[in-house]
Image (tube, grey):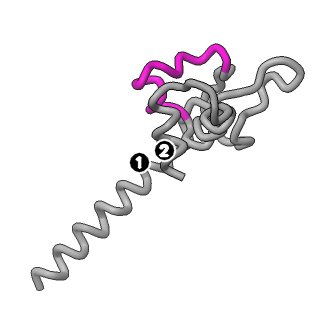
Amino acid sequence: MLDGVIFIALGHHLVADQFNETQRIKMSIHLTHTGFYAGRRFCESIDDGRNVHGSYAPLNNAVFREQCCNDCLKVWADSYDDGEIFPSWVSAIRNEG
């Protein structure tokens, strides 16, 4: 009986985590292109959320980055050439995937 309660509690916790992650993604700040493709998101999603031009975004601010779409950040991190000097957060994102 106790195992069932733990399972139900864990299952509920997982559902809550998935909901929170879904809400976080839905309300993410998306990075967008500038110039001819201005406003087009790096991740190409069409969900709700805010848009910020990638080149003007305060990406060195960790609090801001936590609110950003992970796919957009990955595109930004991958845009650096291997020989370039880039911030440590870019290295972390590149090493994740």
Tell me, yes or no, whether the two marked residues, 2 and 1, touch with CB atoms within 8 Å: yes
Number of numbered callouts drawn? 2
Q: Nearer the viewer, residue 59 or 20?
A: 59
- Up the image or down, 28 lies above or below 10; here it is above
- Toward which corner of the image does residue 73 lie, by quadrant? top right
Q: Where residue 33 appears, x then y in whole percent?
A: 76, 25
Numbered circle sitting on residue 69: none
Q: Residue furthest left?
A: 2
- Up the image or down, 12 lies above or below 6; here it is above
Instruction: Find numbered disc 2 in the image and state the secondary structure of the residue it sits on.
Output: helix
Q: Which residue is at 45% across, 49% downward?
A: 21
Q: Where is mark 1, residue-wise?
A: 20
Q: Which residue is at 65% across, 38% downward?
A: 78
Q: Residues within 10 Å of mark 2 (few under 14, many from 20)?
A: few
Q: Where is mark 2, residue-wise?
A: 23
- The span picked out in magenta is 55-68
- Toward which corner of the image does residue 66 lie, by quadrant? top left
- Up the image or down, 62 lies above or below 77; here it is above
Q: CA distance from mark 2 to mark 1?
A: 5 Å
Residue type at mark 1: give it.
Asn
Residue type at mark 2: give it.
Gln
Q: Where residue 30 appears, x then y in whole percent?
A: 62, 31
